[in-house]
């Protein structure tokens, strides 16, 4: 590590929000020492490649699809689970690419999304108060005093789980599963009778014909259909983990956080003088910052100045998450100021985090219509300002869970109990995700 990266103590001295209160400093040091010996999960060159792809988004030539679990779990690292998430993202990407004729940059909230910022430090159930669950990177979900103690060994477990996930993802995306000629296969075992399954099947048939045509006239190399580019991402939350995985690239002598291709700073940790902004200002990966409704135009300018001082296209993505009721008033002044200053950023919408509420049943949920309305608001604002709506960031799963209300299946509060599996926030299920892709493809075509 060079002097360019502050020490972990210096970072903590700046003030770091949302960090675990580890009871045993020696155990933290032991976990960090172990992480420092581990090989990189991603390569610096891959991160640069992603920066180049996001630069195309900044120029209005491509669209980002970023999606996956709210919180990955260690127990969730199974072949079926990873394949299901990848499959729904591939299906969505195909819909967006084909229906809107725009290249789609695919980024999973995957292989590292294990730490959660929380609104409250503690959780109370039936008169018992314990530390809040902060993701499998920090403590256990079980509501017992033992499980909720932050354990730094979990950081090593998360590294291993991320390595296993990435290994599978790389095998799937280069080994034939993601081959465009498999578009029909991805649709197998979809919810029977779903109108979106039928709509997808029709689109897949068109893609087959288009590929056959391109091959027949000799403009397409079959190898081009065989593999896709897919990148990992997560919120860079736990300083010990991200710092231990920040390494100097032997090609360029520059620091990269090799825990994932793209890392972002959350709404609760984007303090301009805080530790997260400082650490991410030093690494060379493409990075994101969540911007919620309290963001002022000057906040956005200061963040861009600190995080992307050379104004490099593709380096910085603003992920806006205002809520459906606030985006139409809140977003324009920010975009206007950023554009007036000539700042190169990609804009993407997270229509999930500003639209969460507690249903009468007690489940944390989101309404599909609110999510869609925020996406529509995002497109409307960009259209009015002549800027490019560069992408969609969603919490989703490849399974048929019942966590968000509405959508084509018209899930109600009574349905939430059937299959609510998220350990933190509610995700779109497979049908809702595909429905979202078709609706966004329509918006994108008009953009
Ligand atoms: O995913 C984002 C946050 O971690 C989450 O929304 C916080 O949830 P909470 O308000 O239940 O703590
Ligand atoms: C915590 C998250 O979002 P935000 O920082 O926008 O609340 C998240 O995306 O997991």
Image: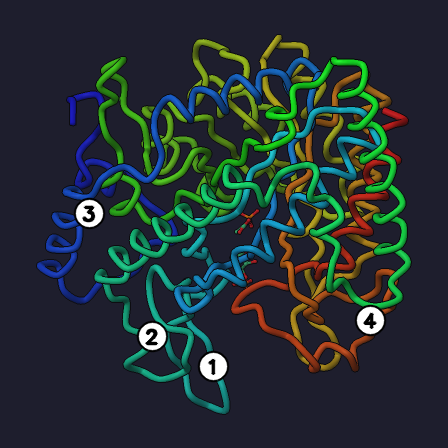
Q: Which residue is mark 3?
A: 35
Q: Position of residue 381 (x, y in %)?
A: 81, 29
Nearer-N-terminus badge (4/2): 2
Q: Which residue is mark 4?
A: 411
Residue farthest toward the bottom in the current orientation of the protein: 126
Q: Secondary structure at mark 1?
A: strand
Give the label, 4 or 2, closer to the camera: 4
Q: Secondary structure at mark 4?
A: loop
Mark 4 within 8 Å of ligand 1, using the beta carbon: no
Q: Are marks 4 and 2 in contact (CB under 8 Å)?
A: no
- Relative to the observer, which residue lies in front, 377 or 71? 71
Q: Secondary structure at mark 2?
A: loop
Q: Secondary structure at mark 3?
A: helix
Q: Which residue is mark 2?
A: 148
Cα distance in 3D space between marks 4 and 3: 43 Å
Nearer-N-terminus badge (1/4): 1
Nearer-N-terminus badge (4/3): 3
Q: Position of residue 398 (x, y in %)?
A: 64, 59
Is residue 183 toward the left or the right of residue 134 in the image? right
* Few, some or many residues within 10 Å of mark 1 (<14, 14–19, 20+): few
Residue name at image x 58 percent, y 14 percent = 344
- Residue 180 figure quarter: top right
Nearer-N-terminus badge (3/2): 3
Q: Position of residue 133 (x, y in %)?
A: 42, 69
């Amino acid at each position: 590590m060079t002097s360019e990266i502050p020490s972990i103590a210096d970072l903590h001295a700046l003030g770091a929000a949302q960090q675990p209160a580890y009871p045993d400093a020696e155990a933290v040091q032991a976990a960090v020492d172990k992480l420092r010996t581990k090989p990189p999960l991603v390569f610096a060159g891959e991160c640069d490649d992603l920066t180049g792809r996001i630069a195309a988004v900044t120029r209005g030539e491509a669209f980002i699809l970023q999606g996956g679990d709210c919180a990955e779990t260690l127990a969730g690292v199974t072949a079926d689970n990873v394949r299901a998430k990848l499959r729904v993202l591939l299906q969505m990407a195909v819909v967006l690419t084909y229906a809107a004729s725009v290249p789609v940059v695919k980024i999973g909230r995957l292989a590292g999304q294990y730490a959660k910022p929380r609104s409250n430090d503690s959780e109370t159930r039936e008169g018992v108060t314990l530390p809040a669950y902060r993701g499998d990177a920090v403590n256990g979900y079980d509501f017992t005093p033992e499980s909720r103690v932050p354990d730094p060994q979990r950081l090593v477990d998360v590294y291993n789980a991320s390595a296993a996930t990435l290994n599978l993802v790389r095998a799937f995306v280069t080994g034939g599963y993601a081959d465009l000629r498999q578009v029909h296969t991805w649709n197998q075992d979809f919810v029977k009778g779903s109108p979106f399954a039928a709509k997808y099947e029709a689109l897949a048939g068109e893609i087959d014909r288009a590929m056959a045509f391109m091959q027949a006239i000799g403009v397409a190399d079959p190898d081009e259909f065989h593999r896709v580019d897919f990148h990992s991402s997560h919120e860079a939350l736990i300083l010990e983990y991200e710092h231990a995985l920040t390494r100097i690239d032997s090609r360029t002598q520059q620091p990269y956080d090799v825990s994932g291709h793209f890392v972002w700073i959350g709404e609760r940790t984007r303090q301009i003088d805080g530790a997260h902004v400082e650490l991410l200002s030093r690494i060379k990966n493409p990075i994101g910052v969540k911007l919620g409704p309290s963001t002022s135009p000057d906040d956005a300018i200061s963040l861009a100045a600190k995080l992307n001082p050379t104004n490099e296209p593709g380096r910085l993505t603003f992920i806006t998450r205002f809520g459906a009721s606030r985006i139409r008033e809140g977003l324009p002044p920010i975009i206007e100021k950023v554009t007036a200053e000539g700042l190169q950023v990609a804009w993407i919408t997270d229509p999930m985090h500003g639209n969460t509420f507690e249903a009468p049943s007690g489940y944390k949920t989101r309404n599909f219509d609110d999510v869609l309305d925020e996406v529509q608001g995002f497109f409307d604002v960009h259209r009015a300002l002549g800027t490019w709506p560069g992408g969609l960031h969603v919490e989703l799963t490849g399974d048929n869970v019942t966590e968000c209300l509405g959508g084509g299946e018209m899930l109600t509060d009574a349905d939430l109990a059937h299959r609510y599996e998220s350990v933190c926030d509610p995700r779109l299920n497979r049908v809702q995700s595909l429905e979202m892709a078709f609706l966004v493809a329509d918006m994108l075509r008009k953009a």
